[in-house]
Amino acid sequence: MSWLDRYNKNKQKLIDANLYDSMQEHDACGVGFIASIDGKPNRRVVTSGIEALKAVWHRGAIDADGKTGDGAGIHIEIPKAFFEEEIKKNWP
């Protein structure tokens, strides 16, 4: 059985179980991935991620109300010690 046959068989199972509707299928504009090859924290990775995010403004990163985001963003690691210090400084 080819991969296409397996795909179609599994797709039909989802359709039969009302778990798939082709009308809900659509393309995404893409995904970006930026990382430091050496695994060390690097500010350039963050700034490059922000630039990449700004390049996909067309995907409508703002909801219809003009204020709410749609989840577009970057994921960064914040060191726990830094986070705890900021909480202490800014907690009333």
Image: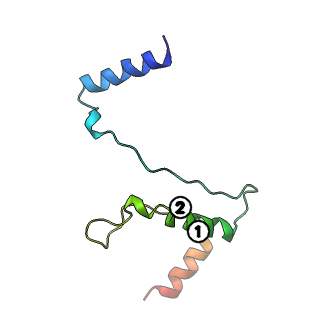
Q: Is residue 52 left or right of residue 37?
A: left
How many residues crowd mark 2 within 10 Å: few (<14), some (14–19), many (20+)?
few
Residue shown at 38%/20% (left/top)? 8
Q: Quadrant of residue 85?
A: bottom right
Pick the front one: 91 or 35: 35
Q: Which residue is mark 1?
A: 78
Residue shown at 43%/61% (left/top)? 72
Q: Which residue is mark 2?
A: 75
Q: Amino acid at mark 2?
A: His
> Where does the image place residue 88, in percent across and percent down from the top left?
52, 84
Residue shown at 73%/62% (left/top)? 40
Q: Is residue 4 above or below residue 51?
A: above
> Where does the image place residue 76, in percent across and percent down from the top left?
57, 64
Q: Secondary structure at mark 2?
A: loop
Q: Is residue 26 left or right of residue 43?
A: left
**Does residue 79 appear anywhere in the picture?**
no
Q: Amino acid at mark 1?
A: Ile
> Where does the image place residue 13, in percent across and percent down from the top left?
31, 21
Which quadrant of the figure contains the C terminus?
A: bottom left
How many residues crowd mark 1 within 10 Å: few (<14), some (14–19), many (20+)?
few
Q: Quadrant of residue 46?
A: bottom right
**Distance of label 2 from label 1 (alpha carbons):** 10 Å
Q: Is residue 78 left or right of residue 15?
A: right
Q: Is residue 63 above or below residue 86?
A: above
Task: Report the label total.
Answer: 2
